[in-house]
Each structure stands twice: as C-alpha cells, then as structure tokens.
Image: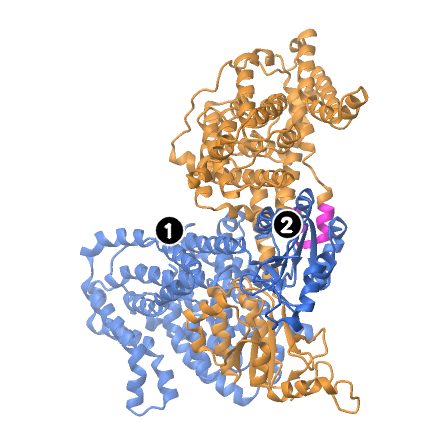
Chain colours: A orange, B blue
Amino acid sequence: MERLAGYLPVLDWGRRYDRQALLSDGMAALIVTIMLIPQSLAYAMLAGLPPVVGLYASILPLIAYAIFGTSRTLAVGPVAVVSLLTATAAGAVAPPGSAQYLTAAITLAFLSGLILFAMGIFRLGFVANLLSHPVISGFITASGVLIAASQLKHILGVEAGGHTLVELGTALLPALPDTNLPTLVIASAATVFLFWSRSKLKPTLQRIGLGARAATLLARTGPVLAVAVAIMAVVGFDLEARGVAVVGDVPQGLPPFAVPAFDAALWGTLLPAAFLISIIGFAESVSIAQTLAAKRRQSIRPDQEMIGLGMSNLAAAFSGGYPVTGGFARSVVNFDAGAETPAAGAYTAVGIALVSLFLTPLIFHLPLSVLAATIIVAVLSLVDLGALRRTWRYSRFDFAAMAGTIVLTLTAGVEAGIITGVALSLLLHLWRSSRPHIAEIGQVPGTRHYRNTLRHDVLRAQDVLSLRIDESLWFGNARAVEDVIQRSVADRPGLRHLVLNCAAVNHVDASALESLELVTQRLADQGVDLNLSEVKGPVMDRLARASFLEALTGRVFLSHHEAMEALAPDVTGMADRADPLAKDASRPFPERGSVTG
Amino acid sequence: MERLAGYLPVLDWGRRYDRQALLSDGMAALIVTIMLIPQSLAYAMLAGLPPVVGLYASILPLIAYAIFGTSRTLAVGPVAVVSLLTATAAGAVAPPGSAQYLTAAITLAFLSGLILFAMGIFRLGFVANLLSHPVISGFITASGVLIAASQLKHILGVEAGGHTLVELGTALLPALPDTNLPTLVIASAATVFLFWSRSKLKPTLQRIGLGARAATLLARTGPVLAVAVAIMAVVGFDLEARGVAVVGDVPQGLPPFAVPAFDAALWGTLLPAAFLISIIGFAESVSIAQTLAAKRRQSIRPDQEMIGLGMSNLAAAFSGGYPVTGGFARSVVNFDAGAETPAAGAYTAVGIALVSLFLTPLIFHLPLSVLAATIIVAVLSLVDLGALRRTWRYSRFDFAAMAGTIVLTLTAGVEAGIITGVALSLLLHLWRSSRPHIAEIGQVPGTRHYRNTLRHDVLRAQDVLSLRIDESLWFGNARAVEDVIQRSVADRPGLRHLVLNCAAVNHVDASALESLELVTQRLADQGVDLNLSEVKGPVMDRLARASFLEALTGRVFLSHHEAMEALAPDVTGMADRADPLAKDASRPFPERGSVTG
C-alpha cells in the first residue's frame, strides 16, 4: 500500500481532500484555464499542428499528471520549446498539415511517454544531468530566438518556412513585399498590448482599486483579452476578406481516441527526438516543480516526476495530442492563484474540455497573427542574453558550452544545438578532470599535520615524496595522475619512497586501478616503492578485492604521519623535537620546503 | 631553439648520438625488420589492401616518428586493431581491391595524421581519456576475436566477408564444403608452429646453448621462419596448382609518392572513422611508450606523441601507406634488443626499404593462409577474457562498460562497439557522480574537529545542520546536491542554519553555482540561512566574481569551528568545557549523534 502510494501520489493527498482545498484549487484552475486557451492554440500552431491539437493536449495529460505527479502545483500542457522540437522532428518525416505529420506528433508523444515512464521506473532521472545549466540556458535562449523568428511569417501574413535562422531569413526576405497590411497592423497592436500588459496591466488594475493578488491574477488574462478583441475586430471589419488568415473551423467535441503509429522505421527515426523531448522537458519541468515545492517546504521525487510526465505524454498520445511537459508561466500562476493539490490540474482539464465542447466556434475568426504575437511575447521572456555575460565572468569553460549551444542551435537547428552542447560540456568537464589537483605535502614542524609545500613552511625528506590527491580517481583523470607521478619522480634522483595521501579519494574506478598498478610497476622499475596513506574504507575494500594490495611494493598507512614515521624517521623525529625548540633561533632549522634528512 | 627542440626531439638526442648508440640501434633495427616483414604484409591483408601497402606503411612513417616522437623505443607501423578499423571504414566506401578502396585507406591515414597533429598542437591529448580502461580492454579483446574470425576464410581457402561475428559466420558456414585441403594443412601447420614458437622456441634455443638474450631475440623470428618454410613448401610441392592462394606479384621498388583524395564528401564519410583510428591508436601507443620509458626512468610527452604519430600518418598518406601507430610486440622487441634512440626506427625503415627494393620477388609464393595464421596467433594474444572476471570482481559498473563494448563490437561492428563503450562509461560515471558523498558532521567533543555523525560520537545543534560535501560540484552532481540538501532540511522542522563544509570542494562549475543560488533561495523561503565553511581560495574567488556571496543569506567562515561558535555557541561552549570533564562519569554527557543545545 505504501509502495503503491509511492507510484500513485493521488492516494496520499486525495484522502485528505476537503472543501477548503476544493475552493482554492477551483479558483486556480479557472485562472489557468483562461491562460491556457490561447497558449494551447498558439503552441499547437508553433508545432505545425491544427490548433485543436493544443486543446486536446491540455485535457487528459493534465488528469494523468494529477494522478501520478508529485508536484502540488506544476501545470502541464503544451510548451514552447517542446513544440519547437516536435515541429523539427515531425517536419523531418512529413510536411506540416499532412495526416502523417499529425501521426508523427502523436507517436512522438507516445515514445516520449514510454521513455519517461521507463526512466522513472528504472530510476534513471540522473540522465537529465547530461544537460548542464549553461547548455539548457543557452538552448532555451536560442530556441526563444528561433521560435520568435519562425512566427514572423504569421505576423506578416506570408508563407516562409525553415528550421534555422539562416533558412528562416532567406525564406522571409523575398516574401516581404507580399506582406498583408491588415495582418501586420492587428499583430503589431496585439504585440504592443501584450508587452504592455506584462508589466503595466497589474499596476493599472491596482490603481483602479483592485487588490494586489487580484491584480496579479487578472493581469495574466492579457492574452485572452487580446484574443477576444482581435476576434471582434476581424468580425467587425470583415478583415478575412482583406487577407487576414484566421484559425478557421475547429472541430467541436472531446478529444478523440487516437493511436500512435506502430511502425518500426518511424520509431527509429523519431526515437532520438523523443529522447531529447523527454530529457529537456523533464529537466525544465523538474526544476520548476522543485522551486515551487521549496516555497512551501514540500518536496518532489524526481523519479516519480518522470513517471508522472510519462503518463501525461501517453495520455496525450491516446487522445490526439502531442508532447507535453510542465510549463513555467502557468505553473507560477497556478501557484500564485492558490492551488493546493494536483486536483487543480484536473479541474483545468475540465475547463479546457468545456472549451473544446462549446467554445471552439468562437475561435473560428481568431487571426493566426495574434496567436503568433502571443508566442513571440511569451518566448522573448525566455531569452536571457545576460546569462552569457554572467557565465563569461564566472567561467570560460561554461561560457564556451553555452555559446556553442546557442550558435549551433541558431545555425544548425535545435537537435544539432543540444547535442553539440552536451558533447561540449562533457568534453570540457573531461578536460578539467584530466588536470586533477595533486599537491606535494610536507610536515608542519612540530605537528602531525601535513600541508601543501607550495603554501606552507613544511619539512620534506630527501628520499620520500608525499603527494596528496585531491580528487576521486576515474578514467577521466587516471592518465593525468600517472603523468604527474611520473614527472614528480623523474625530477628526484635520490627518491626511494612515494606516499600517496588518499584522504580525498572517494572512489577509484577500474581505469584508475589499472593506472595505479602501472605506476606501481613503473616505480618499481625505478627503485621506488609506492605507499598509500589515509585510504577510505570503501576504497580499501575494493583495492583488496582486486588484489592490488598484494602487488603494492610499499605499505598502506592509517595516517600520513605513521607513513612518515616509518619511512623517514629522521625528519619526523626532528619535527617531534622541533616544537619546543621552534623559537630557539640559535638552532639551525630546516627552511621552507627544503630537503632534509 | 628550446621550443623548436620541444617539437623536434631529434635535435635533442641527435646531438649526443655516438658509435655505441649506433651499434645498439642497428642491432635492434635488424631484429625488428625481420619481425616486421611478415607483420606488415599480414596486417595490410587484414586491412583489405595489397601486401606491399604494408611495406610502404613501414618505411617513411618510421622515419617521421624518429624525428618527431618522444619515445626512445616505440616502434610504429601497421597494427592489427587499426588495420581492422581501416578495413571497416574503407569497406563502407568501396569494395576491397578497388582503386577507390586504396584511396580511402590513404585518405584515412591523411585525416588521422591531420587530426593527431592538430590535437597535439592544441594539446588535446586529454580526449583519449574518453576511452576508459575497461572500454579499451574490451574493445581490443573483441577486435582480436573479430580479426581471428575474419582470417578463417584464408585458413580455409574460401571466399567469405563480413564485419560482425554473425556476418562472418553466415558467410563462412555455406562456404565450408569448398575448403581447400592443402591450404588448410599448410595454415594449420603454420599455426601450430607459431603457437609453439611463442612459448617453446626460446627454451629450446637456450637448451641448445644460446644465451638468454639471444634466445629471446631469435625466438621472435618464428614468423619469418614460418614464412620461409611455407614459401619453400609451395614452390617445392607446386601447391599453387592445387589451389593454394599466394601473395602473387608484389611491385619492386621504393614507396610511390601518393596523394590522398581531396573530396569533401569522402572526407565527411571517413572523418568519424579517422577520429576513432587516431584516438584508439594514440591511446594504445602512448600507453606502450609510457611503460617502456618508465623502465629506463625516461619520460614521454603525450602531446608531442600526438604530433609524432600525426606526422607518421601524414608520411604514410603521402607514400602510399595506410594508418599506422605504435605496435606493442615490436616495441617490446625493439626495447629488449637494446634500441637506445629513435634512430633505431629509422634504421628499421631502411631495412624495410631494402626489402621492398630487392626481396619482393621472394614473397610471390607466400601463401595467404600463412599470413592469416600469423595474424591469428598475434591477435589471440590480445584476447584477455580474464579481464572480464577481474573487472566484474572489482566493479559492476566497469564490467558493464566492458561487456557492452565487447558484445556490441562483436555483433554490431567495431565502430558501434567503441561508441557504445564510450557512451556507456560516460553515463555510468555520470550516474556515480549523481550520488555525491555528502555527510552530516558534528563536533568531536572537546576538540575543534568535526566528523561524520554516522561514524563518530559527535555533538550536533538542534537548529544548525552541518553538511560536508566530499566532491567538487559540477553539472553531473549539482542536482543531486540540491536534492540531498532539500531532503535533509525537510526532515528538520526546527532548523535555522545550514552550514556546508566545502573543504573537499575543489571546483564549482556554473551549473553548481546555479544550484547553490537556487538552494539559497529555497532555504530562505523556508526560513533557513545558508553558510559556507572552509571554502578553498580559488573557489572563493570565483564565487565572489559571480556575486554569489552577496546573495548568500548566511556567512562564509574560515573554519567549521568558527561557524559553529557563531551559530551554535551553546553546543561549542559545552564542547569546549567538555574536554577536561570527559572522564567525569557523573556529568551528563550528550550521546552519540544526539540533538543538543
């Protein structure tokens, strides 16, 4: 039962559900529904799908998440970046508008659902760690720019496609003379209003007497207002006759039962994109959920989140939708509006279901250019160029990963961009790992402490070299450790003992073990024995299992001081005597880093 | 000048070259030449190239390495694994035996040369760290099996091709009835003799009175003996008339001047394979070079090694050869035979040049099956199935990477195998990183030391939580650190201060910085401030640059004890008093891990 409740969080919060929660959740759901109507239509258009698919993707997936998700306030549904990824992947299979394109989108949702569900069951959430913050941040910024650019054709009322900035630009430029003026005017007005409503609607509402919270929530209805006014303008001035493209006929009714394609070739083609959609969607969603949960001292479980999002996507696939994930803006609204449990998501689903049952005829005259304007205003808030400057100042490496991701995403497309980013950040991490911090240490006179010879006045023995390794040893740095040891020893002709202080070594993988074996052997060829000190328990167990300790030419010491007492009794003896004499200037005393013994 | 000598090691050792070195190098070169003749012919055959290409690849590349390489004793030339990779890559472009196939092989050498040279100049040797030891070891074992299987057709004298075990098997089985008996007999005899000569020739030679060193060296001539006897048998019994396939006409003369194809499409196709050949060749070569150098307290410079191998491959490309790298067996022979400088390699080149000028007519009657036997005997020594058992015992993770590499190499081919291995080992490393070691610490009573609460009897304060992070923070573990902190805090309702002990944190990348910022904010939402202690200098500088310290809700303390004195004076005060009283049983004393204050 406990275990079942782990997989079905609804069993936990559902038992304690009361009237107070119902009221809070209902209020939040109302606001989110109003916000979600234009968003779901717009993101479906961005994904190259009929607008109604956006509504379908905002019904069953929300209910699935309410049952399986662990966040109390995350609002799932179509989001901008995942819509762009869907457009790219489905566009590689079939032309937008075709039946195969819709099937590809549905199949993407199905595959993403399977991937997320399986990763959740097998607790593979760590795979999202592949996406470093600079890579995600750069990818989202570049996607925002790409998405905004891709919507310009709707703003101008012309035909132009493409998946990169260059493609979009070269398609758009020759089409400029065909710009439809009424379309452009209505889109510009919507854009200006939407930008204004983002920052100014709330203070305006407060000035006319609304409370802060009500003003905050009402300000979120800007897009719905724009949509309503645009529809009235189109109808009132008969703008369709003047060439303004509108949404047109939207089928009325509940989502159909859909089935993804079970076609091995199609699966093979879509699998990489489905994987990207899963990982990027999860990484974004889990970060929103965690931030909101922390605000109320709640917690979420990332692996169960994968199951929740997986079930959402499966629900999307079987109800004619397309890939969904947690959306930032709508989750914040849901939270601010007071949602207390995932039931708010289910109520939102009911709201959207009512819309698709009864209100779709109203959308007929909605201009596409106004949907494009809502997309542009939404995604431009994702663009964070300041992050480039901040990251540059913090670390050149992270900046390189971020800049590489942005440039590739813009010029070679979303998939190439994210893959380059991941590869680049892994390579840079590997490069950094290949230069582990290794310090030569010596005895702080009069103590049993050993410190970096470069930073402290310490004692060293002529025939003993003490190195402290400040990292776990794994294949990324194993060779570098070999090199450092080899070079340190080559510089010391009289050397007889090497002591590696392993206090900071939490793990030794098989590659590093091989390196240690090689080092032992090479040192033996040079007449130097290898000793270890302060090896952690679990590391010691493993080394013993691999029979490394039998091959060791020296010994393993519990403390570094013990090692020095055994290997360089002269120096440690002098040091032990040194303390009381330290202030006796008449006594010749070893100098900083000098070779003694 | 110093700098130039860095890029041209020959300037260094060349100046001190004397008669003694000349004699040693000359002797070693003679032995290596005798060993290299059958090897170069055989590996060219394995690569699907005319045997003479193997000779060409053993002349100029050796001279280039003698000028640019840093190892005194590494012997470069055609090797088994690189030959197999060449066959796979060239075979994807053109059928073996065609002019395009040869051009592809030459172009592979050219691209590998460029890649290695560029990586050497830009000091990118760390990229070889992508290949963890289990992956290389598994790859070489599987390659050995694949190579041996691919030579069975020559042993049987039938036609059968393929790049995976399954392909080879299904091609070979139906061809079995066509087995040529004389071919099989001669190949079996050669195989038995070669296996015998590996282990028994040396003791036999010693028994008939040779010194240990002479016996060791002469035992290496087994393959040449087998070749000579086989040629005589073919000629004596006219085995060609009975269907024994022989090498046939080998052009007499020095290597031609060849030019790689400058064809963007071909480059695009071959680039991934050239990259693999470069990295695998380098990783193998540098490990051999390092082992041999250590035996004489010499050292090699990995980045210059890349330049040396790069120049070798460029030399191969412009003289009608194919990709080369340092070979294990022949380097050991070179070392054992007393080679003192890279000049030995140059003399070997002269030896092979003389062979291709004068001795190629002798090779006409050499049976292909005997070459196949030398390959099989050579590569089966690469197969190390014991490594599977050893790795299993040491670490399940490393075993998974090794087993994955072996299975994929055998069933899906060399390229899929190595790529899977690299991806798998990176993912497993990432998984391990995603569970960083974080310990709650408390004060050892009466001291200023803080230790893991799970392992020691220590004091903790009720409203202060002290966590020690035992890893550098990077994108692989940043999210996990967030989770651990979130969970620790969620368990402690009365908490007011969190202190992260950063003594073991050597680096904080941008993703981890973002995590720390998020954690700070989330903790603030919960009324907990975040403090740091024992932050290393370089880490501190970076945090300051990113303005993290201004956003910090708590403070940064030099030592953990200072932090506790400031945040939990009750506990530390009690601890300070505790020492002299520790043995006073009448005084109630806080228990292990108990919450006090």
Q: Is residue A425 above or below residue B134?
A: above
Amino acid type, residue under disc 1 in the picture: Ala
- Pointer 2 residue: B511
Q: Position of residue B233 (x, y in %)?
A: 23, 73
Near-viewer residue (B65 or A123): A123
Q: Which residues are magenta?
A: A388-402
Q: Position of residue B520 (x, y in %)?
A: 68, 48
Disc on res. B412: 1
Quarter of the figure that contains the N terminus of chain A: top left
Near-viewer residue (A200 or B340): A200
Q: Is residue B313 above or below residue B228?
A: above
Q: In which chain is the residue bearing label 2?
A: B
Sort mark 1 into few (<14), some (14-19) or many (20+) by Cα contacts within 10 Å. some
Disc on res. A299: none
- Magenta region, main secondary structure: helix
Determine if residue A266 is in view. yes
Q: Is residue B372 left or right of residue A476?
A: left
Q: Position of residue A403 (x, y in %)?
A: 67, 46
Q: Secondary structure at mark 2?
A: helix
Q: Position of residue A443 (x, y in %)?
A: 66, 79
